[in-house]
Amino acid sequence: MEHSFLSGESLWGARDAFTAANAACKGQPLGGEKPSAGCKAFLDKSEKAAAQWELERRFREFEGKF
């Protein structure tokens, strides 16, 4: 997702560093069902971040099966 052509800012706080979320979503469980109001507002305005958030949710769901 980081290098996709989707519009908006990345979910990640630093380019190509996939360990810390953007300040708006920092400290949130990535892909969580209920992001904070600030994180939700960020996701609503960034197609790229929203797609990454959904991917993280799917990863959590998949990994939870094992």
Image: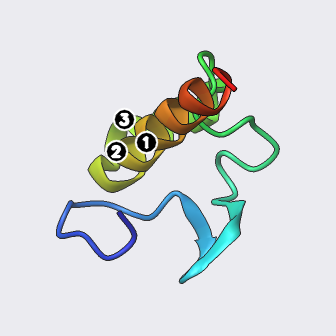
Compare marks 2 and 3 and give the one earlier in the sequence: 3
Q: Amino acid at mark 1?
A: Leu
Residue 63 horizontal/vertical position (percent) = 64, 33
Neighbor class of circle 1 (other Cα within 10 Å; few <14, some 14-19, many 20+) is some
Q: Amino acid at mark 3?
A: Asp
Q: Residue at x 47, y 32 (%)?
A: 58
Gap in Å between the C-alphas at discs 2 and 1? 6 Å
Location of residue 59 (image quadrant): top right
Query: In this image, 22 relative to 49: left or right?
Result: right
Mark 2, residue position: 51
Mark 3, residue position: 44
Gap in Å between the C-alphas at discs 3 and 1? 15 Å
The nearer-to-camera label among 2 and 1 is 1
Neighbor class of circle 2 (other Cα within 10 Å; few <14, some 14-19, many 20+) is some
Contact, mark 2 vs mark 1 (Cβ under 8 Å): yes
Contact, mark 3 vs mark 1 (Cβ under 8 Å): no
> Which image quadrant: the C terminus?
top right
Q: Residue at x 24, y 69 (%)?
A: 4
Gap in Å between the C-alphas at discs 2 and 3? 10 Å
The nearer-to-camera label among 3 and 1 is 1
Disc 3 secondary structure class:
helix
